[in-house]
Image (cartoon, grey):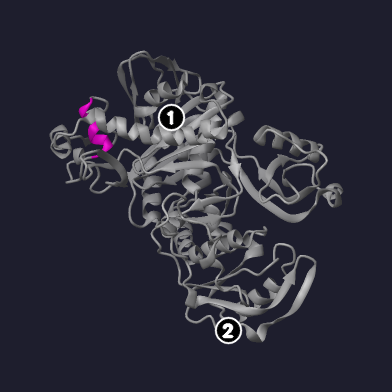
Amino acid sequence: MAILGVDVGGTFTDAVLVDGGTVRTAKVPTAARQEESVLAAVRAVGATDVERFAHGTTVATNALLERRGARTAFVSNDGFEHLLHTRRQTRAHLYRPCADHAPPLVPLERCHGVRGRLGPDGELEPLDLSTLPDVGDVEAVAVCLLFAFRDPSHEIAVAAELRARHPAVHVVASHEVAPEFREYERASTTAADAYLAPVAARYLHALGVGARDAGLPEPLVMLSSGGVATVAEAAAHPATILVSGPAGGVVGAGLLAQRAGFEDAIAFDMGGTSTDVCLLPGGRAVRVAEREVGGFPIRLSTVDLHTVGAGGGSLVRRDAGGAIRVGPESAGADPGPACYGRGGGATVTDANLLLGRLPDELPGGLVLDREAAARALDGIDPAAVIDVVNAEMLRALRVVSVERGHDPRDFALVAFGGAGPLHACALAEELGIGAVLVPAAAGVLSALGLVASDERRDGVVSYVRPLDKVRDDLPQAGEADVRYRGQSFELTVPLGGDLADAFHRAHEERYGYADRARELELVAVRTVEAVPGPDISLLVTNRHKVVGPTLLELDGATCWVPGGWHGETNDEGTLVLRR
């Protein structure tokens, strides 16, 4: 029986089919309707008799970034209707006082209040559902009441009332998706979840029908946390899939790094539109409890990716001062780079072609037009373009390594995506990294990660209580958010041992001191239920032994090995390059 993974990117949709030890791959342009791209990739890879089908999607991310979500209302406590608009009363940018925040997903006229109030120790004012106003003509409603993370009874009643009044409207309560303290972050997450639900549900339903008609099993959808869940679970809470596609690449990079004998690695995924980087200590992605997407805090477990708008299709231009700028705008799949011959603008791909770092013909029979690339760049030095885009990606790599207190020289760089292996060695040299890993399926590694992903359920319980009062009731596995009483922010430490000692040590490591006499406060406990993914084996079909400078064509990607670098393929099919 075969295992199928399909990842939808901004430019291409990738498919990987693992049958025994044999791996088949396919890459097709991403269409406006993503489900059409998924099924086209399935046909291209020749998937039949599939046992497991995992899918990574950008439909929720694109809908949030492009503001194409549902018409949504917001319900909070009476007097707190402005919650999404007041935010944290901080600047959008510390050193740019005039910079604006992203406009809230729900305009003020659709933000409503209901009388009733819970406090940290119980009910302060009874809930009065008669004060719940008509939410009007909307597709979704987000409900976020004070202290619902501790006692959801008022939220449950409000949500039930809204569902009874509006049976066709999607209603989401904050305790269902993000039961954590910090009112604005919880409200922001709930509003995004409600805003995206109708769009994501339509897409996932269409995909499920298409998969069934194609004789495929129901898809498992990649979560932002790096696991997979059912279509129904993803459709109910699409905020959990905002980093769906890139998370698959992180899983695949960690798997191949471990198998190549590198415990610590950095995932470097450069596609056609953007570049995603992630630290992989011990071969597993670092996860964070909160991430900003499109200017909105999303308080859900997410792989700790850092993304920049730099990819193979990033457009090149000169600014008013004559400096070369690259991205974040992209040529996409259509028209694509100028060298595709479809009238596109100058891109990073065109610069790589003119530098001799791409073949004349890409996989799939696409012949590249060097003259069109030269015309599009119009006197701009291709080497300067590469320097600019490398500088942007170098900043991203430093964010997840140096700025987090890690020495990149202790890590290997796993290069994937269609353009990642073209730039990896130059970036590694800048960071002092001595080993670059290029998977055989570098161009479709995100889809391969989907194939190997665990089924994962993340849970969180908020406490915000003195640690001594709850320590005996904690689970043995998971993580805890702890802080000194009176602090505004917390540190995450593992459960299972002396939690207080673990926090003091973590605080001393982070801030240089620990106050062991000070009272500790337990903020939240995070747990995971995971069913391990399939154990896949990869057979080596092509072995390579290279000495730079040389160009190496791979399935779905091209690797540039500069002078001073050499390497060979290991038993898993991964090209291990060293300085």
* Label 2 secondary element: loop
Camera-side residue of 513 and 15: 513
Find the magenta span and give its range. 347-355
Task: Report the residue marked by disc 1.
Answer: 415
Q: Residue drawn at (59%, 62%), measured in percent from left and top?
A: 184
Dot 2 or dot 1, earlier in sequence = 2
Numbered badge on residue 574: none
Residue 226 in which image quadrant: top right
Amino acid carrying label 2: it is Pro
Chief secondary structure of the magenta portion: helix
The answer to whether 87 appears left or right of 158 in the picture is left
| Whether residue 559 is situated above or below residue 534 in the rendered picture | above
Q: In this view, which residue lies farthest toward the bottom?
A: 130
Above or below, comparing residue 525 to residue 76 in the picture: above
Which residue in the protein does label 2 denote? Answer: 133
Residue 96 can be seen in this image = yes
